[in-house]
Amino acid sequence: MHLNQSQIPVNEQVEGACEMLGLDPLYVANEGIFIAIVSPDIADATVEVLRKDEKGKFAAIIGEVAATNPGQVVLSSRIGGRRVVGMLPGEQLPRIC
């Protein structure tokens, strides 16, 4: 998998809080969020349909399945770097709900 950080919709307040606390938003619980893996042939149309609903207004294409780096998720950062997004080390933050 190849992800583009600049395409991942993260709420401004969440991003700010994560930055202050030294957390990566990719590892913070995101209730109500889902990822759909669809054929590139229908990806744009799928996003279009999702955005028509209020709850899908932030739908986006955030990456693609790639033949490079098999078995890994690679993230391209906003500043041009690349890193492997590994499994969460240790425990996930407790939910406050």
Image (spheres, rainbow, N blue to C red):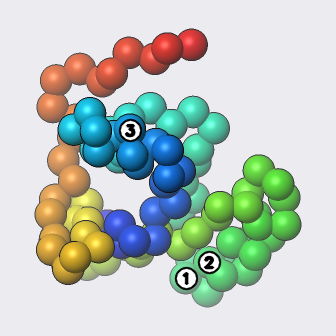
List x then y, in percent, for residue 31: 57, 33
Query: Helix, strand or loop at disc 3?
Result: helix
What label sits on residue 59 in the rendered view? none
**Whether residue 90 is visible:** yes
Residue 19 image-quadrant placement:
top left
Marks 1/2: CA–CA distance: 5 Å
Q: Nearer the viewer, residue 54 or 62?
A: 54
Number of marks in picture: 3
> Camera-side residue: 3 or 79?
79
**Residue 10, percent from left and from top:** 49, 54
Q: Which amino acid does label 1 sit on?
A: Pro
- For image coordinates 58% across by 44% down, the residue present is 33
Q: Name the residue under label 3.
A: 17
Circle 1 residue:
40
| Residue 85 in picture, x, y percent from top left | 22, 53
* N-term mark: 1 or 3: 3
| Marker disc for residue 43 | 2
Q: In which quarter of the image is the N terminus?
A: bottom left
